[in-house]
Image (cartoon, helix red, strand yellow):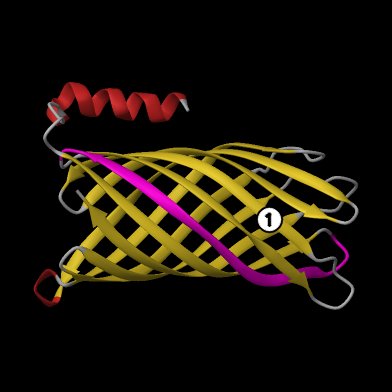
């Protein structure tokens, strides 16, 4: 959250204000097909299922945006793997440095729940997003990458390596945008008792964006 505050403050000092006449709200419903994989030394535990949610983004001028997201769904385990519910709340600040590149900072709280218990995750991420236009600007290629300098997981030590990467396409028609994105999060936890825990969450996400005045 401190990193997000630094980015927001830099944008304000850099001339993103005044914003009273430049604010715009973007509402993005989304649906994902997500796969969760865990390898804790006993083979890969795999679960798959839909996640529904939405993102609300408030733009202040052309440089600064603040976004809040809420997601939830159910992941159904393969043979011998428990089904689990997942929910997430997150916030993200983004500052455009040049028209095609933005710096981002965010924080999120995620929870996985099975019939045996609940596991909470708290993360802070720092990253960037690049967008390149094709077909006269109607289509944009999108690439995102972020590192997680802070990851707290109930019952586990923090991971040695944690990152997220994503790529996708967006198609814009007037005030609406249709998008598809593939993303992957990877967490490599330190070995305990000679066993190293590896965890991954990947998803294919469809987005429908509507700009409101």
Q: Nearer the viewer, residue 180 or 173?
A: 173
Residue 191 visible within the image: no
Which residue is farthest front? 213
* Label 1 neighbour load within 10 Å: few <14, some 14-19, many 20+: some
Whether 198 is drawn above or below 67: the answer is below
Task: Classify mark 1: helix, strand or loop.
Answer: strand
Q: Look at the magenta stretch and give its main secondary structure.
A: strand
Residue 48 relative to residue 27: left or right: right
What residue is drawn where x is 51% and y is 42%?
90
Residue 47 visible within the image: yes
Residue 54 part of the magenta-drawn span:
yes
Residue 82 relative to residue 18: left or right: right
Residue 47 relative to residue 97: left or right: right
Q: Nearer the viewer, residue 162 or 116?
A: 116
Whether 64 is drawn above or below 11: the answer is below
Q: Which residue is mark 1?
A: 86
Q: Quadrant of residue 179?
A: bottom left
Whether 8 is drawn above or below 91: the answer is above
What residue is drawn where x is 47% and y is 48%?
69
What residue is drawn where x is 15% and y is 30%?
20
Magenta stretch in the rendered image = 41-61
x and y percentages locating residue 196 in the rendered image: 79, 53
x and y percentages locating residue 166 in the rendered image: 43, 62
Residue 96 part of the magenta-drawn span:
no
What residue is drawn where x is 38% and y is 25%?
5
Residue 64 relative to residue 85: left or right: left
Q: Quadrant of residue 8?
A: top left
């Amino acid at each position: 959250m401190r990193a997000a505050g630094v980015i927001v403050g830099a944008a304000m000092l850099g001339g993103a204000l005044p914003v009273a006449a430049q604010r715009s709200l973007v509402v993005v419903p989304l649906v994902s097909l997500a796969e969760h994989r865990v390898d804790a030394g006993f083979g890969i535990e795999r679960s798959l299922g839909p996640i529904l949610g939405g993102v609300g983004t408030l733009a202040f001028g052309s440089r600064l945006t603040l976004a809040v997201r809420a997601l939830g769904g159910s992941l159904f385990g393969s043979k011998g793997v428990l089904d689990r519910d997942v929910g997430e709340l997150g916030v993200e600040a983004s500052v455009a440095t040049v028209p095609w590149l933005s710096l981002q900072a965010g924080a999120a709280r995620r929870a996985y729940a099975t019939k045996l218990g609940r596991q909470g995750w708290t993360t802070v991420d720092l990253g960037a997003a690049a967008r390149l236009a094709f077909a006269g600007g109607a289509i944009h290629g999108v690439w995102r990458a972020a590192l997680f300098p802070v990851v707290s997981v109930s019952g586990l030590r923090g991971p040695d390596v944690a990152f997220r990467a994503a790529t996708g396409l967006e198609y814009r028609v007037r005030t609406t945008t249709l998008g598809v994105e593939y993303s992957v999060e990877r967490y490599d936890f330190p070995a305990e008792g000679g066993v190293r825990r590896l965890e991954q969450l990947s998803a294919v996400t469809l987005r429908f964006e509507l700009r409101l005045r």
